[in-house]
Amino acid sequence: MFNIKTYNAISIKGLERFSREHYEVASEIGHPDAYLLRSQKLHGEEVPETLRAVARAGAGVNNVPVEDFSKRGVVVFNTPGANANAVKELVLAALLLGSRDISGGMAYVQGLTEMTDAAEMSKLLEKEKKRFAGNELKGRTLGVVGLGAIGSMVAEMALALGMNVLGYDPALSVDAAWRLPSQVERKENLQALLAHADFVSLHVPAIAPTHHMINDESLQSAKKGMVLVNFARDAIVDPEAIVRSLDAGQLSQYICDFPEPCLLARNDVIAMPHIGASTAEAEENCAVMAADQLMDFLENGNIKNSVNFPAVSMPRASGGCCRVTFANENVSGVLGNVLSVLADNNINVVDMVNKSRGDIAYNIIDVESCPIDEVAEAICRVEHVINARVLK
């Protein structure tokens, strides 16, 4: 029986993935094997000795002390792409809001409360509608910064609308490159993209290299009148620099999901209350994906979509073999020492996989017979081993 502690309101479709036969799932639970959460901040919280995994039902993990968990051998999962369609659709809304004064027109209409004659109102609106005219998206150029799950979908959507699309991603993975439409023109640096785009949509994670990547210096390269769209993270944009660029007329509009005091009460800013992934479908997709990843890890030791451990997966060997998994500091000789422990106890290895990521290594070993508790404890005592599990 595995114990899963939940935080926040997790979609019932995700919770239903856990069978009652093998899982105890609750918001208050002792000796948890894993956490399942959305926005709960875990920084500073005491970490139970039993904790082996944390799954965040969403892409960002700013609310999780990833580095501390890595040192304890706790695997941190996220759900990249599960909310991508929700964000993509809101980006489309932002592009439309940025190309035509839709919000200004609606606000104008709602202000005509003193008018009582429909014919008079129609005549007035026919006269005033030119104040809210704009441009079509077709033929304009969109720059997409970050070409992962969401960025590639935004690029594909823009192409379908007849836009020209530029892309920039210094850390483009092979998988992401395969997903990317061939019509996207890749730029070698951010400045080159900003200089040629009418609209720019940001889709990079909030990590040290992307902190305030949109700043006074980078905005000097922006095409005059550019519209900047940010449904990624607040930390990648310097809001004070945005204000200065808007005041100077370099940027024409800033549309974002992250309001800040300095951005309020401006006609050239449209700020939304962090609703990019706030759809019923996105919450369900994230919860289901997080639950499935936790179950595969707890039951089989497989790791997919971890932000701190390598991706490791191995099918169970036939014949009902037992499985040993362990995490260790990424130094030489550890795997050999663990295999020696197994050999000394006459435990034959059937199959195995070993991968590393940064300072962490992770191993899955299928063996013919299940180690007794003393053998598992001996593996944990091997120098540089962080933790180990025996999965029957």
Image (cartoon, rainbow, N blue to C red):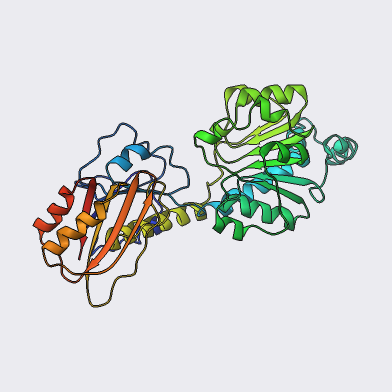
Q: Residue at x 73, y 31 (%)?
A: 221
Q: Residue 73: image x %, image y %?
A: 28, 46
Q: Within the image, what quadrant is residue 39 found in? A: top left
Is residue 205 left or right of 14 when viewed as pictured?
Answer: right
Q: Nearer the viewer, residue 155 or 180?
A: 180
Residue at image position (63%, 51%) is 89
Left or right: residue 152 compared with residue 112: left
Q: How many marks?
A: 0
Camera-nearest residue between 165 and 341: 341
Farthest bottom residue?
319
Residue 334 visible from this viewpoint = yes
| Looking at the image, residue 57 lies above or below residue 210 | below
Residue 258, position in %: x, y? 57, 33
Tell me the quarter of the image containing the C terminus.
Answer: bottom left
In the rendered view, tell whether residue 384 sits above or below residue 222: below
Residue 264 appears in the rendering: no
Which residue is at the front of the view, 216 or 350? 350
Q: Quadrant of residue 275?
A: top right
Q: Residue 81 at what x, y percent from top left?
A: 52, 54
Question: Which residue is painted at 62% across and 54% down in the image?
Answer: 153
Q: In the picture, which quadrant includes the N terminus?
A: bottom left
Residue 272 percent location from the top left of the image: 60, 36
**In the image, is residue 106 above or below residue 139?**
above
Q: Choose between 224 and 258: the one closer to the eye.
A: 224
